[in-house]
């Protein structure tokens, strides 16, 4: 579970949900996942997700730890009047830097004076629905070395930085952008936990037409 989507770039998804005002339980209708790893690890290091909210809006997240060089993570909001870009690690919104609220100070004030929490537990519900979808998804798929540049101590996936930029622009997954290492093998995981069996999670009943589940081989639009 300690992958790119759920650890180093968990802030990207949480910030996107906050910007959409979709943070509480029930805000997420479905999640599509494409989980990959270039490094010889169990978790994902290069992944994309598309979250469909209960009100019909869409959030797409594309992340990687295998790009050439470092780029600050950012959020793009698409609206009817244009777009806005937030670099959440530097607090820049369309180039203007805004002051940051200190959550630790807020917590101390909450404990000592009863001040309202800026990030109460209820505002984490939607992110936990997303996290549960990642937990129940099939294991990340390996990216073949022919699509990598392997250096001492690190690996780079060719063209992945451009793909993440395109994903933010088009709200598309890696496979939809033509990444040669990303076939359409993702599982659409819903927000309701799958029934548990002695052999692990079991897929819910599908509603055709839809993608094929790589866990059980059946096709359907997974709820």
Image (cartoon, grey):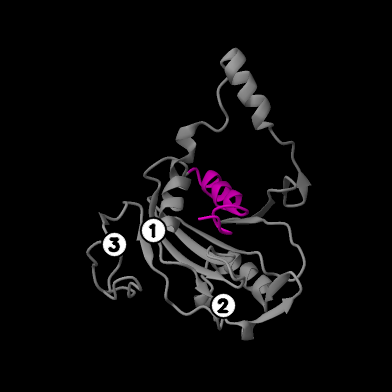
Query: Mark 3 or mark 1, which has the lower sequence index?
Result: 1
Quadrant housing the C terminus: bottom left
**Image location (x, y in percent) of residue 11:** 60, 49
Whether residue 64 is situated above or below residue 196 in the rendered picture: below
Residue under the image location 69 percent in, 73 percent down: 155
| Callout 1 secondary element | helix
Front residue of 96 and 89: 89
**Where does label 2 land, which residue?**
143
Spatial CA distance of label 1 from label 2 is 21 Å
214 sits left or right of 73 in the view? left
Say the numbered circle drawn on residue 199.
3
Residue, far front: 198
Front residue of 155 and 191: 155
Residue under the image location 62 percent in, 70 percent down: 39
Residue under the image location 74 percent in, 40 percent down: 98
**Span colored in magenta:** 1-21
Say the numbered circle drawn on residue 67.
none
Residue 166: quadrant of the picture: bottom right
Pointer 3 local density, CA inside 10 Å: few below 14, some 14–19, many at least 20: few
Query: Mark 3 or mark 2, which has the lower sequence index?
Result: 2
Whether residue 96 is situated above or below residue 186 in the rendered picture: above
Pointer 2 local density, CA inside 10 Å: few below 14, some 14–19, many at least 20: some
Whether residue 158 is situated above or below residue 18 in the rendered picture: below
Spatial CA distance of label 3 from label 2 is 27 Å
| Callout 3 secondary element | loop
Spatial CA distance of label 3 from label 1 is 13 Å
Query: Mark 1 or mark 2, which has the lower sequence index?
Result: 1
Say the numbered circle drawn on residue 136.
1
**Image location (x, y in percent) of residue 124:** 48, 40
């Amino acid at each position: 579970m300690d992958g790119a989507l759920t650890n180093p770039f968990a802030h990207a998804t949480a910030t996107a949900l906050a910007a959409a005002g979709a943070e509480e339980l029930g805000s997420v209708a479905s999640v599509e996942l494409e989980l990959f790893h270039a490094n010889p690890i169990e978790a994902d290091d290069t992944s994309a997700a598309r979250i469909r909210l209960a009100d019909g809006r869409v959030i797409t997240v594309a992340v990687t730890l295998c790009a050439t060089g470092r780029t600050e993570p950012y959020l793009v909001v698409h609206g009817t009047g244009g777009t806005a870009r937030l670099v959440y690690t530097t607090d820049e919104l369309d180039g203007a830097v805004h002051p940051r609220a200190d959550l630790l100070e807020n917590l101390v004030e909450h404990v000592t004076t009863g001040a309202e929490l800026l990030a109460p537990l209820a505002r984490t519900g939607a992110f936990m629905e997303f996290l549960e979808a990642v937990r129940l998804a099939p294991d990340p798929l390996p990216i073949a070395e022919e699509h990598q540049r392997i250096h001492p101590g690190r690996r780079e996936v060719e063209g992945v930085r451009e793909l993440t930029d395109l994903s933010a622009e088009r709200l598309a997954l890696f496979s939809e952008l033509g990444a040669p290492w990303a076939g359409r093998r993702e599982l659409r995981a819903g927000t309701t936990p799958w029934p548990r069996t002695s052999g692990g999670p079991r897929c819910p009943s599908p509603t055709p037409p839809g993608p094929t589940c790589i866990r059980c081989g059946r096709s359907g639009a997974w709820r």
